[in-house]
Amino acid sequence: MGFETTIVISIFLISVLVLGTNSYAVMSSSNDIVSDAEDIRFEMQYNKLNSGVTPVSMNFDNETSILTIRIINSGSIVLDSDEVSILVDGYLQNYDYYPKTVKWYPGESKIFAVEDVSGLTDIRVKVVTSNGVSGHIGGTPRSVDGTIPDIDWDIDPPEDNPDEIITIDSMMIDNPDSILIVEATNHGDTTLYADELSILVNGRVKLYSYSPDWRSWYRGETKTFEINDVSGITSTKVEIITDSGISASLSGIPEKIKDK
């Protein structure tokens, strides 16, 4: 009887040891996965927080029918000139850039050339980096002749441009009701879902509603988002993030809605 008990106890202890070893291996592997995911998330957040592009001027070349936009890398990290998206009035365009160096350093000004535009009309240009940070400029371009000679304009957009491209077009504040009103447009090829977004105001996640009130957010569609519990007309940063991590941001002082 005592011998049998010893065998049972030994088997039990061995089982506990085996299970403990397996559990440790699984937990260690899980911890590695979580750690890797946190590193990737931190890198994405760092790149977004430290990226910035600022379009400063637009010229229209009458000889070539080319629109040129001077843009400054206003962030603190190096960007790639061939990994941006340029939209004119909401449509993705082919482009080239000058100087021809791919690396685009902080503080450096580059000229981006866009072909097949409608000429000297009032237009809105949006520049979106590969991590979703954007800048915009609007108005009527200045008319010039032969600004950048000897440039090959036949460059297609990069194949790895994200299928999801969103822009934040405006923001207004309704002070009496503490509501921030944001207009955003889906420029990508993918239909998004308005109830699967994250909206941050000054780094904090906020509750929101949207209109039109159907959840599908189609290509080219502009939606209005109402964000609760935001007051004041101080400098504000709004960020919209899709469920796949593509984001757009807009910073500035919201326009005050006139009292009804």
Image (spheres, rainbow, N blue to C red):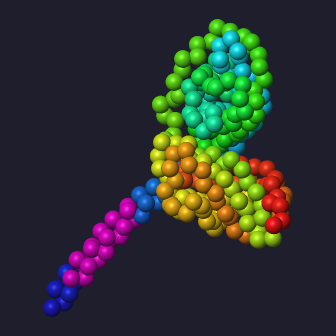
Q: Residue at horizontal 38%, vertical 61%? A: 25
Is the C terminus in the top left, top right, bottom left or bottom right quadrant? bottom right
Q: Residue furthest top?
A: 150
Drawn side of residue 235 relative to residue 149, left or right:
right
Drawn side of residue 8 relative to residue 163, left or right:
left
Q: Where residue 19 sits in the image (x, y, percent)? A: 31, 70
- Measured along the vertical axis of the image, is residue 76 above or below residue 14? above
Q: Residue at horizontal 70%, vertical 33%? A: 123
Drawn side of residue 150 relative to residue 256, left or right:
left
- Using the rendered image of the protein, determine whether residue 154 is visible from the camera's viewpoint: yes
Q: Where residue 249 sits in the image (x, y, percent)? A: 67, 49
Q: Where residue 107 sits in the image (x, y, percent)? A: 77, 31
Query: Which corner quadrant of the image does residue 205 belong to?
Result: bottom right
- Using the rendered image of the protein, determine whether residue 39 is visible from the camera's viewpoint: no
How would you classify the magenta stretch by its main secondary structure?
helix
Q: Where residue 34 sits in the image (x, y, percent)? A: 49, 58
Total count of labels: 0
Give, as a single range, the part of the protein colored magenta. 8-26
- Measured along the vertical axis of the image, is residue 145 above or below residue 254? above
Q: Residue at horizontal 51%, vertical 61%? A: 214
Q: Residue at horizontal 72%, vertical 33%? A: 122
The reply to whether the magenta stretch includes residue 239 is no
Query: Which corner quadrant of the image does residue 26 belong to?
Result: bottom left
Is the N terminus in the top left, top right, bottom left or bottom right quadrant? bottom left
